[in-house]
């Protein structure tokens, strides 16, 4: 793996962490976007699968949009992340080692994701307001990533793919809880930003490692 850009990416991710609960600012947006954009550049320089580069780049765009924290940019950011997840799904299913039969080797995991999606949709639908459509459309896409990653065998570096996908799902669930379910000034809001970012960025690094 080309490490020249990994360290700047990690530095940006670390610098962004204390800013994650802060209001939107130019520096906050730049750090958040660069932390993943540099991972996409790493994948490109290392001649990684094009779908990995595309997925990381789309997520970096999503980060830039979400960092402005308006309803309009939130909707656009969800769209960018949904496209990024679709690219990840395509990556999982098109990998030379991929085997669809592996998906059915863990029925408990599969049905747990289905139940999780139904619960999330039930809780979020009445609270998402004008964002209800994008939020409900995003749920099956992120869970689809969680299901299709099972087609990737847990061998070598590929073993990082499943925990990375789970970390991605966890970060999205915490973010949705933070934005739509917790009331303002809830004590949990003091710690949720410090959970979302490490899980999310760690997931992107894990997927980069898995598919390089």
Image (cartoon, grey):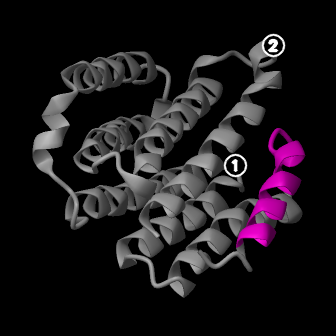
Viewer-nearest residue: 195 or 136: 195
Q: How many marks?
A: 2
Q: Is residue 34 above or below residue 192?
A: below
Viewer-nearest residue: 93 or 74: 93
- Residue 72 shows in the view: no
Within the magenta stretch, is there residue 18? yes
Q: Crowding at label 1, few (<14), some or many (≥20) Cα neighbours within 10 Å?
A: some
Q: What element carries label 2?
A: helix
Q: What is the span of residues highlighted in magenta in the rendered image?
A: 6-24
What label does residue 187 carry, if any?
2
Q: Name which residue lies at 87% across and 64% down.
A: 27
Within the magenta stretch, is there residue 130? no
Q: Name which residue lies at 35% across and 50% down.
A: 155
What label does residue 27 carry, if any?
none
What label does residue 69 carry, if any?
1
Residue 20, percent from left and from top? 80, 44
Name the quadrant of the N terminus.
bottom right
């Amino acid at each position: 793996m080309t490490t020249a850009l990994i360290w700047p990416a990690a530095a940006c991710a670390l610098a962004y962490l204390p800013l994650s609960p802060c209001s939107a600012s130019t520096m906050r947006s730049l750090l958040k976007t660069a932390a993943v954009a540099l991972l996409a550049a790493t994948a490109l320089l290392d001649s990684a699968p094009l779908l990995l580069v595309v997925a990381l780049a789309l997520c970096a765009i999503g980060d830039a949009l979400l960092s402005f924290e308006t309803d309009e940019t939130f909707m656009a950011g969800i769209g960018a992340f949904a496209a990024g997840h679709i690219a990840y799904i395509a990556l999982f299913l098109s990998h030379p080692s991929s085997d669809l039969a592996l998906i059915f080797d863990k029925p408990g995991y599969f049905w747990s994701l289905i139940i999780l999606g139904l619960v999330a949709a039930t809780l979020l639908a009445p609270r998402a307001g004008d964002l209800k459509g994008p939020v409900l459309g995003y749920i099956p896409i992120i869970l689809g990533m969680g299901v299709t990653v099972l087609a990737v065998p847990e061998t070598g570096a590929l073993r990082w793919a499943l925990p990375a996908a789970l970390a991605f799902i966890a970060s999205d669930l915490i973010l949705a809880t933070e934005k739509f379910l917790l009331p303002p000034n809830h004590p949990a809001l003091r710690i949720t930003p410090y959970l979302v970012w490490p899980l999310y960025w760690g997931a992107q690094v894990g997927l980069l490692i898995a598919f390089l």
